[in-house]
Image (tube, rainbow, N blue to C red):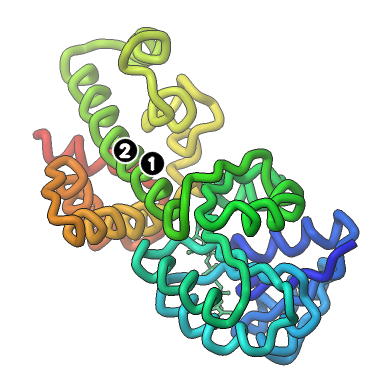
């Protein structure tokens, strides 16, 4: 049994902390939101009065926070309060520059650190089936390994500090672009009188095959579990897709690159999210594609 601190007990951090409790660990949690603390407490997490109190005896400190500035502010507060030998694992999705800065702060405080953003969403967090994209020194990633193995089914060590965030934004840029491309294909098929099931049967077994077709198909019918079958409720929220696309854009800018499809996807999702009056799965972009194509 290990003592583990989880800072940020929201949609992702909450169920992750609960899974660590179920695996027999002593989990100390903290969140600024009372409701998140109450839910975590009901799941067996020992809710601390502050982040510093939560990390004091922890061997592993997990942060699951909204954005880079939250992580850096938290690290400034938590690192000096943490125990010798503690490993800091940031599972938030943040910009690569902040991730590298977080590693520098940890190293300056004599702590090992890993950036370990996740794929799998709330369902993966609840089911303990996340995929972690890890960046950091090998011994830090190895030290975090047994805990990440409770929370997910796979950890890929992508490289040095920040590499996990870069891998995540690259993957999600492909996802954002491919969902728009798949939506355009289904809209074209619709207009040409092709049955969406027929198009799915072809694409899911041909060179057009991708996650946006096979798992998260944007039209109802072919994949019964895809959000399109429940009016795009649940799934991977469009604002989170937009967040990840913007991180990829910012990283491209920083590297002096012009990535035209990534940029176009960011623009399309910005317009889409701005117009939405509710939060839906990112595959609802097909409605925007249908309208724009008319
Ligand atoms: P969330 O908003 O539900 O949870 C974040 C929590 O952090 C909130 O409860 C907030 O009160 C808390 N918080 C903010 N600052 C804090 C601080 N200083 N100390 C303690 N708590 C603090 O967000 P989420 O959906 O859990 O996402 C967390 C991270 O995971 C984000 O970076 C997100 O991009 C990433 N992510 C989310 C999903 C998803 O499907 N929700 C999927 C993959 C990755």
Q: Tell whether 41 sits left or right of 116.
A: right
In the rendered structure, the answer to whether residue 64 lies left or right of residue 181 reads right
Q: For mark 2, what is the residue?
A: 174
Image-based side of 66 in relation to 153, left or right: left
Viewer-nearest residue: 58 or 231: 58
Is disc 2 in contact with disc 1, using a CB cutoff of under 8 Å?
yes
In percent of width and height, residue 117 lies at 51, 55
Visible residue check, residue 126: no
Write the residue at 66% across / 75% down.
Answer: 36
Which quarter of the rendering shows the N terminus? Answer: bottom right
Q: Label for residue 276? A: none
Q: Residues within 10 Å of mark 1 (few under 14, many from 20)?
A: some
Q: Residue under label 1, please give it.
A: 171
Residue 48 placement (x, y as % from top left):
76, 86
Q: Nearer the viewer, residue 264 or 224?
A: 264
Q: CA distance from mark 2 to mark 1?
A: 5 Å
| Tag 1 secondary structure | helix
Q: Residues within 10 Å of mark 2 (few under 14, many from 20)?
A: some
**On screen, 274 above or below 121?**
below
Ligand 1 lies under 8 Å from the Cβ of mark 1:
no
At horizontal 23% and vertical 23% (from top left) the residue drawn is: 185
User: How far across and down, in percent of the image, does residue 13 sit?
Assistant: 64, 65
- Mark 2: secondary structure: helix
The residue lying at 63 percent from left, 89 percent from top is 80
Residue nearer the viewer, 182 or 148: 148
């Amino acid at each position: 049994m290990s003592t583990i601190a989880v800072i940020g007990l929201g949609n992702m951090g909450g169920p992750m902390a609960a899974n660590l409790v179920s695996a027999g660990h002593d989990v100390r949690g903290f969140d600024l939101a009372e409701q998140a603390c109450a839910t975590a407490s009901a799941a067996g997490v020992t809710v601390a009065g502050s982040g510093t109190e939560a990390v004091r005896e922890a061997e592993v400190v997990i942060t699951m926070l909204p954005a880079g500035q939250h992580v850096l502010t938290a690290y400034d507060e938590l690192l000096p309060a943490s125990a010798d030998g503690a490993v800091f694992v940031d599972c938030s999705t943040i910009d690569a520059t902040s991730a590298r800065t977080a590693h520098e702060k940890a190293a300056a405080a004599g702590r090992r650190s890993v950036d370990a953003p996740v794929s799998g969403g709330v369902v993966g967090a609840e089911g303990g089936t996340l995929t972690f994209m890890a960046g950091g020194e090998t011994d830090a990633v190895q030290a975090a390994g047994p805990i990440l193995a409770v929370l997910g089914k796979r950890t890929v060590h992508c490289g040095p500090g920040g590499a996990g965030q870069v891998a995540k934004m690259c993957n999600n840029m492909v996802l954002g672009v491919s969902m728009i491309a798949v939506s355009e294909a289904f809209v074209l098929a619709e207009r040409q009188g092709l049955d969406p099931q027929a198009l799915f049967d072809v694409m899911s077994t041909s060179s057009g095959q991708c996650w946006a077709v096979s798992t998260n198909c944007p039209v109802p019918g072919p994949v019964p579990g895809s959000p399109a079958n429940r009016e795009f409720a649940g799934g991977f929220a469009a604002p989170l897709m937009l967040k990840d696309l913007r991180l990829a854009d910012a990283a491209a800018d920083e590297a002096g690159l012009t990535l035209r499809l990534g940029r176009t996807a960011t623009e399309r999702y910005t317009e889409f999210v701005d117009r939405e009056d509710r939060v839906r799965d990112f595959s609802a972009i097909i409605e925007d594609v249908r309208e724009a194509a008319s």
